[in-house]
Amino acid sequence: MNDDELLRYSKQILLPRIGLDGQKRLRNSRVLIIGAGGLGSPLALYLAAAGIGRLDIADADEVELSNLQRQILHATPDLGRAKVNSAAERLREINPLCEVNPIPRRLEGAGLDARIAKVDLVCDASDNFATRFAVNAACKAHRKPLVSGAAIRWEGQISVFSGAPDAPCYQCLYPADGHDDERCASNGVVAPLVGVIGAMQALEAIKYLCTAGNPLEGRLLLFDALPAEWRQLRFRQDPACAICHPENHAKR
């Protein structure tokens, strides 16, 4: 690392659980962020500032006026622009050492699979179950760690899935059938809530890449902003999960 990098990341390098080796891991890491909205904004800002070497950011939407209440990557002059382009510009201003690759479309099918195969970690900041299930399946197939977050109204949640064969996946926690596809666009969300959850996603991603502390594997962290309370639920791999145990479903 050169002197500029050492100074830029000095407060992280001082941490015993990160140090110079951990900072080099961050610099050599490639992370895919799905969504450049409410969760993706603080998530991407903190990962870029922390020194992730490359950020791939996928989002098909353009910046709208109603986004600006909570999507802090974007500003009023960005109205009508592709969110990923607005995001890339802001992230490069914060840290020009971070390579930002904007992907102005929804990743799905073979395209999603190919992108996930190339990265070290995936952060799901999407707002619908269909995307979450597809991202989870691809991460499990490629054994890629997944940091998943969600926020709506006054409530948020976050968990980490390692992608290991014997570890639970997102679909173990939320079976693919029987879910309402709730989005903050139709239900509302208090602005700082997505900041809290998005920042937590960035924190878990940094911890995982630096092998620092205990990731939220097998644990779902729930936050209720109105009483300002956190709860933790533990869960295991579901023997009936079609993603973790496809062989059981193939026999049906």
Image: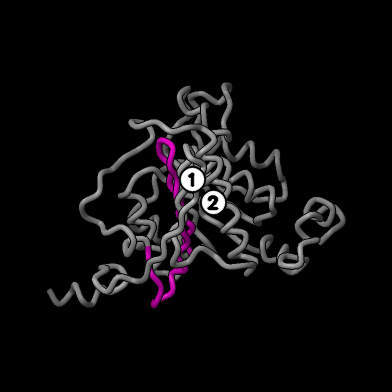
**Residue picked out by circle 1:** 103
Q: Amino acid at mark 2?
A: Asp
Quarter that holds the C terminus: bottom left
Per the rendering, the mark at residue 209 is none
Residue at left 58%, top 42%?
42
| Magenta span | 145-169
Q: Which residue of the protein is positioned furthest toward the front in this rendering?
A: 227
Would residue 205 be found to the left or right of residue 153 on screen?
A: right
In this rendering, the answer to whether 113 lies above or below 227 is below
First-in-chain label (2 vs 1): 2
Taking the image as drawn, is residue 124 in sight? Answer: no
How many numbered circles are shown?
Answer: 2
Q: Position of residue 195 (x, y in %)?
A: 55, 40
In this rendering, the answer to whether 49 lies above or below 116 is above
- Here the colouring is one colour
Circle 2 Cα neighbour tier, 10 Å, few/some/many (<14 / 14–19 / ≥20)? many
Q: Amino acid at mark 1?
A: Ile
Seen from the viewer's position, the closer of residues 123 and 55 is 123
Would residue 252 be found to the left or right of residue 213 on screen?
A: left
Residue at left 61%, top 62%?
207
Residue 229: in magenta span: no
Residue at left 51%, top 54%?
32
**Location of residue 53 by image quarter:** bottom right
* SS category of the residue bearing label 1: strand
Q: Position of residue 91 (x, y in %)?
A: 64, 41
In this rendering, the answer to whether 125 lies above or below 143 is above
**Residue picked out by circle 2:** 56
Q: Position of residue 29 (x, y in %)?
A: 62, 62
Q: Tags 2 and 1 in contact by the CB under 8 Å rule?
A: yes
